[in-house]
Image (cartoon, rainbow, N blue to C red):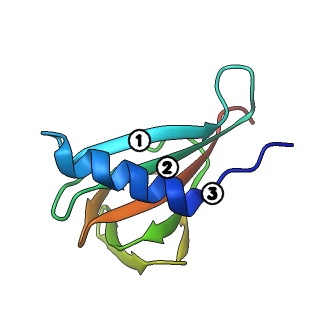
Amino acid sequence: MDATSLTRLAHEQLEQARDASSGRAATTVHGGHEHDLRQTVIALAHGRSLGEHQSPGEATLYVLVGRVRLVAGDNSWEGSEGDFLVIPAARHDLTALSDAAVLLTVATRA
């Protein structure tokens, strides 16, 4: 069994995001081609976003640090540390309302 500190990873990724020209950084915690589940810590500097994109399939978002806004069509959700959201199966965008890090969990196979 492997154990990982998501808090430590979130802060490490935030440091990288602040230094990156894109204002974002990410690392896969679990998963890959041989797994049915992928979990990624994504960090965004304040004001940065992922840009609108299609949902990768069944997915959830857990806010580790900071505040974020998820927009899908006419729907908008704001979350802060400890909040959990099932990502809608629609085009959406994630924006950091402060320096933020989230855990994205995606089911890669049904």
Of mark 3 and mark 2, the one earlier in the sequence is 3
Q: Amino acid at mark 1?
A: Ala
Q: Residue at x 58, y 58 (%)?
A: 6
Q: Can the viewer see residue 83 in this picture? A: yes
Of mark 1 and mark 3, the one earlier in the sequence is 3
Q: Amino acid at mark 2?
A: Val
Q: Residues within 10 Å of mark 3 (few under 14, many from 20)?
A: few
3 to the left or right of 105: right
Measured from the top left, where is residue 74 in percent x and y?
Answer: 29, 69
Q: Amino acid at mark 3?
A: Ser
According to the picture, the residue beneath numbered tag 3 turns out to be 5
Query: Is mark 3 in CB contact (under 8 Å) with mark 2?
Result: no
Q: Name the element at disc 3.
A: loop
104 to the left or right of 47: right
According to the picture, the residue beneath numbered tag 2 turns out to be 41
* Cα–Cα gap, marks 3 and 2: 11 Å
Q: Residue at x 74, y 28 (%)?
A: 35
Q: Can the viewer see residue 51 in this picture? A: no
